[in-house]
Amino acid sequence: MSAGEFSDDEFFRTLQDSHARALLIGRRALIALGAPVMTADYDLWIHRDDIEALNAAFEAVSHFANKAPDQARLLGRYVIENGERIDVMVARAASTPAGESLAFADAWARRTRLEVFDGVFADLPCLDDLILTKRWGSRPRDLADIEWLGLLKGRS
Amino acid sequence: MTEEKEPSDAFWETPIPPEEFARRERETLAALAGPEGDEMRATLEWFLRRYPTPLQRIAYIRRKMREARAFQESAVRRMGDPPADGRGGA
């Protein structure tokens, strides 16, 4: 592993130790659930009051925010990066192009907890909310992801 | 396996209008009842069985991405090589 990179177990341990209210979203969430799709990034949706806690935890593994917390709150998103790239969404809510809204508070209340490995857990939106997050972009690649999520939903 | 497309891949990255997206989402989910769904279901079950923890699944995908990148890089290098008979290409 090159300098400035971390392993996936280190990512999840750091995330858990940060105590930030953070939902794993995007394709990494799909993979964690069982869909064999490819991605290079981590995507998180966190509570806007927990930016500092998350940043402090990742600074300890040499990953740094590209925006100050107040600026990130204004923009609704930022990136934590070095050898790995973590897209962090901090918006209170987001809507699909069709106007369907999802508030972080509601997604957090309905979250699913996954054991990633021995005693280390990650929080994910429930399957219906994950499907809704895929409508935010409304791209063909999001349809492919919804297909996998539909399969996972049928299985649960 | 569904591959993440390069950002330059306009087809995969171009948003679809809401009504069209809703229609295609309904069609996509309905198709899961057919042979395509059966094939994906089998892949899903294999993936979950072979890699039982989320960490193992993420590690598998990372490995496959590294392999795909290495294959692409070697293909690009081969394209730049002179023909095997030593003659230069025009």
Image: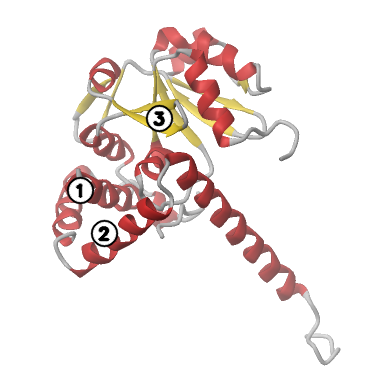
Q: Is residue A8 above or below residue A31?
A: above
- For the residue carrying disc 2, how many other residues have a C-alpha within 10 Å: few (<14), some (14-19), or many (20+)? some
x then y, percent, for residue A19: 46, 12
Q: Earlier in the sequence, mark 3 or mark 1?
A: 3
* Amino acid type at mark 2: Arg
* Amino acid type at mark 1: Arg
Q: Are marks 2 and 3 in contact (CB under 8 Å)?
A: no
Residue drawn at x 17%, y 61% as measured from the top left: B31
Q: Nearer the viewer, mark 2 or mark 3?
A: 2
Where is mark 2, residue-wise? B41
Q: Nearer the viewer, mark 3 or mark 1?
A: 1
Horizontal side of residue B7 vs A109, given as left or right:
right
**Disc marking residue A155:** 1
| Chain designation of label 1 | A
Q: Are marks 1 and 2 on the same chain?
A: no
Q: Is residue A51 above or below residue B58?
A: above
Where is mark 3, residue-wise? A24
